[in-house]
Amino acid sequence: MNEQIPPILRPERVQPISLGELKLRFGLSWATEIVPAASEPSSKVRVSGISMNTADLRPGDLFVAMPGLKTHGARFVNKAVSYGAVAVITDQAGVELLDGVSVPVLVLENPRAQLGDLAAFVYGNVAGNLPKLFATTGTNGKTSTSYFLEGILRQIGEVTGLTSTAERHIAGEVIVSRLTTPESTEMQALIARMRERGVTSVAIEVSAQALTQLRVDGMVFDVVGFTNLSHDHLDDYPDLATYLQAKAQLFTAKRAKRGVVSLDSKYGSELLEISQIPTVTISSHSATKADWNLTVTSEEPGKTAFRLVGPNQELIESSVSILGAHMAANAGLAIVMLIEAGFEWHLIAQRIVNGIVAFLPGRTELVSAAGSPSVYVDFGHSPDAFLNTLAAVRKVTAGRVIMVFGADGDRDPSKREAMARVAASGSDILVITDHHPRFEDPASIRAVLISAARQAKPEMELYEVSPPEQAIRKAVSLAKSEDAILWAGPGHQDYRDIRGVRTPYSARQEARDALKEFGWQ
């Protein structure tokens, strides 16, 4: 079996199910070309896991061979069997590619559409046997809201799980993530592992791609939340309307029981109109009418305090230990999601009165010591993320705001100019560098950013520095003790993607090293 880093997480113990049970539950048929119809021996074969690629395969698995962009998974069935697969599900096109298969084969047309349900059945993730499930979607704020959900749940006595862009959490165990939302087979295995560990509530970050690629199939969430929608991922979706429709799939009876929508972006009201489940609203804008209203009461480098008022004058006062009004808004969304799930608002208010205990890796993370320039490392890589984070940093900075950023290669080039314009408008000094160039020429990416920044602010003090290890050193060399440096893009990530190779790299450590080299603590 191929080794995965980070690992695929599965339950340690699974109650195997027979192919006969699986065939009956999903109305499958035997591939008569491979095994005799209604084969009694085949019906008794038992599976203890499910996989869709050989890299994730374990002995005892059911291998689902699906058509892909370049080839059909059926071409890998013999390899899967050599790794220990005991049965195969594929479509008729896959059956026709099989030759000399020694395990039972079941036929299912369009297996991708039922992959999540198959995985849920194999791992025993059925109604009445699940923790409370919370899902958050939106362009920005998904990760933050998920961490706040988990933090509050812990504070009110729940055993928690989390899956986000940065990490997976299982009852206190922390594992690095591979995808924002895992494939449905991995997601169902993860939920089963959480059940095994006694998890009672799970916060899940759900991207638009996860919905259109059916990665959360087989799950019905207790409550779903929408943060906002802004310019991003237009390499995957032709326009913002289509992007919104992708996220709106979460607000259907197939996916969720109840919803909470933030009205802080104009797309919140549009989502509310098309939501197919009972949905309440929240806003941090005083002029916006919503069921719940949030007011930021103070902003400091290590604390943002807020007040949340409900439709029946419920009052909850708390804070988050992270910079920015947008972070308080995400915390408010998390609170309302929990109330919609049936948790008592006054219990939440009591437990979080001294603050929500949650650490958000790489989200406006302060990596410098007192007395030196404030250096924040942030994962944000969209125009709206830049706008909110720069405004938050500006509010608590006595001196100048210096920004370091680059743009992704091979990802939505349409947002690059907008990112550069926002960066130029919101900072005093700009250092443009590289991020994940992937297979693009990094110099050409920088050229687009520089041109857009200069058009937005011709008098801008601007530097082009590559690679980013030198860019942060340039920023630190320009900074005084009262200044702040915002390094946007890398956040918690520990690598750079250069021509398909993940090169080890830590923005946090590079920033700290740069400060030391220039004489700061």
Image (tube, helix red, strand yellow):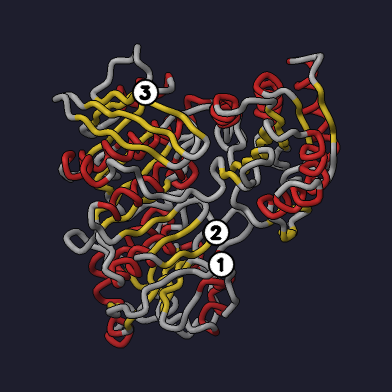
Residue flagged by tag 2: what amino acid is it? Arg
Question: Would you place residue 171 above or below residue 433 in this image?
Answer: below
* Residue at the (21%, 43%) spot, across then down: 350
Q: Nearer the viewer, residue 350 or 332?
A: 350
Residue named by callout 1:
6
Disc 2 + disc 1, Cβ < 8 Å: yes
Q: Which mark is residue 186?
A: none
The N terminus: image quadrant = bottom right
Residue drawn at point x = 41 percent, y = 27 percent: 298
- Residue that badge 2 annotates: 178
Amino acid on which disc 3 is placed: Ser
Residue 55, x across and y down, in percent? 57, 72
Cα distance in 3D space between marks 3 and 1: 37 Å
Horizontal side, residue 380 vs residue 32: left or right = right
Find numbered disc 2 in the image and state the secondary structure of the residue it sits on.
loop
- Under mark 1, the amino acid is Pro
Counting from the top left corner in percent of width and height, residue 42 is at 33, 83
Point out which mark residue 284 bears.
Answer: 3
